[in-house]
Amino acid sequence: MRYSLLAASIGLCFSGQLFAAAYQLTELPSHSTSTNTLVIDANESGEAVGRATGLFNLKIDTTYIDFNDDNLKNDYNNLKERRERIDDPINFTLDDIENNNAAATDPDAHDFLRAYLNQRSGNAEYQKLNSSASLVYSTTTADEKVLFDVERDYTNNELSRSVVSYINGVASDGAMVGWGSAPYSKRTDFTKDGESEPTVFFERAFSSRGVFITPGGEVIELPPAFVGEYGGYSIANHVEKLDDGTYLVVGQSSIDVAIDGQQRFDDLCKGENEPVNVCVWELQNGSIYYNRHAYQWKLDANFNLIEGESKILGLGIEREENEERIHLGTALSANQSGYAVGHSQTRKDGDFISRQRAGYYKDGKFTQIIDHDKIYEASRGVDINNNNIVIGYRFDELSTFQQVKGYYYDINNQSFTEMKSFFNSSDMYPRDINDAGYIVGQAEAEDIGDSPRREAFLYNIETAELQNLNDLLPCKSADFPYRIGDAVKITEDNQIYAIATKTVKRRDSLGNVTKNSAGEDEFESVSVPVLLTRTGGQPDTCPVEEAETYERSSASFGMLGFLALPLLMLRRRRK
């Protein structure tokens, strides 16, 4: 059965809502077995997708771990000493983990092993874990949508939890797009040169594969332009259902192996001390292995890929003779007219610019929309509406400083406008624009030193009015515990999907509610998805908030800031 969060919003509306505010807030369902739940995109019918982070109870394989390893012992002793110094001793030993399955029953043991594995995430001889999942919302639940993960023997026939997956966009009929990585398998048959016993390796078939998900839930792979022997690379960031019933999907695809990538492969991947597939994985972790360009796929009304319509959208740079470096470009969104927006590497005055610059793709050509003066400047094109207005942000890519400015650009008259933020040095990340010219996103709302607070905004192009969405909601109180940290989607009738934080009972990595030394429940701030709906009321006048005294261990606004990272593979939109 199809669902609609918008249709259900009245029934689900937060019971303590004060309708004098300009917007009412509806908390959407949260994922039941994770710490944080995020919304990424929704369509006009209220069909929404998102992401869970901080999954509980990840299964850890201990059968291959060397418990006599000095590094493991040192890590354990360091943890033991730290906890004893604060009068909070741990209650497990390494022998408990090895022989008594302590990692499955003791949250401290589970945390310890997860940290040990995470420190070795770049080493193929250790299990790979990922504590996130893609979600599809119903009116009452936020359900995981598995893309490529499978059950493995080494996780007791449960999902491997070794994959990364995103669902980035929803079409008008509920079709979705995204991408995921292949699950890792445990290989036990490879013996290194000069050794007599095999070494365990964890390997996977590909790093990223785009997907199209039909309204009925079938997952269809979107193949890269170049697959090669080691899987290739593709991601799908946005889907647009066109008037003729076809689907336009945009993202990024591998085109070929970069020349320097091939040279590194030839030099290093000889299959002597590790499987060749593992060597390629290491090359991809350390640097970019493929030339990756902005790409489109077209599907017909029956969800078949249309022959000849999968193609490169363009690139802001032409390869020079004997040029070996990698070339990159990507598309993050598209509109009904076939304009796609994103970013690409370019040249300036004949010089190669490694930083990618914002622009739009049309008829096989990339058009840069910001004239950068410095080589360290970069920009992103994030979204485009059906009036051909692009939104995005520009920034200086420096190691110690990064100032981010939002903008919108009208393709029709080639006009660029920088958006004014809450104060001069406020970083601003526009996320989504509707056809009426309303923009939502995230910006630094208060200048409070090294950690300015990021909050959600609403911007009106026609009036140039910038509003903090928290100012349009009821005053924060025991009856209204929310603070809106990011807004990711605005519909044509100005419904806003956003991410808020609120305080809940803290749970450990196994999912159990934690207690302090006095036996009282502990609390933390977590992320929850919300829907904001206009009421016709006026903003409330609120007292100055007191500083919060609990530790934001899971969902501080710094965590919400991950949405502002230029990976914006997390692309989403509406049509």
Image (tube, helix red, strand yellow):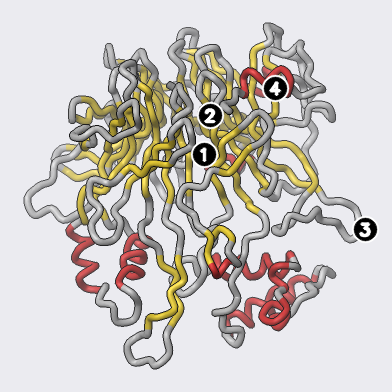
Q: Look at label 1 and name its amino acid.
A: Leu
Q: Look at label 3 and name its amino acid.
A: Ala
Residue named by callout 3: 518
Q: Relative to 314, say whether 71 is above or below.
A: below
| Disc nearer the start of the sequence (4/2) | 4
Crowd class of label 4 (few under 14; some 14 to 19; many from 20; radius 10 Å): many
Q: Is residue 97 left or right of residue 486?
A: right
Residue 566 appears in the picture as rendered: no
Residue named by callout 1: 563
Q: Is residue 82 left or right of residue 346?
A: right
- Mark 2 → mark 3, Cα distance in angstroms: 40 Å
Q: Looking at the image, which residue is at 51% across and 27% down?
A: 424
CB under 8 Å between discs 1 and 3: no
Where residue 313 appears, as percent x and y from the top left, is 23, 33
Residue named by callout 2: 488
Q: Select label 2 or label 3 by which is in front.
A: 2
Residue named by callout 4: 25
Q: Looking at the image, which residue is at 75% across and 14% down?
A: 540
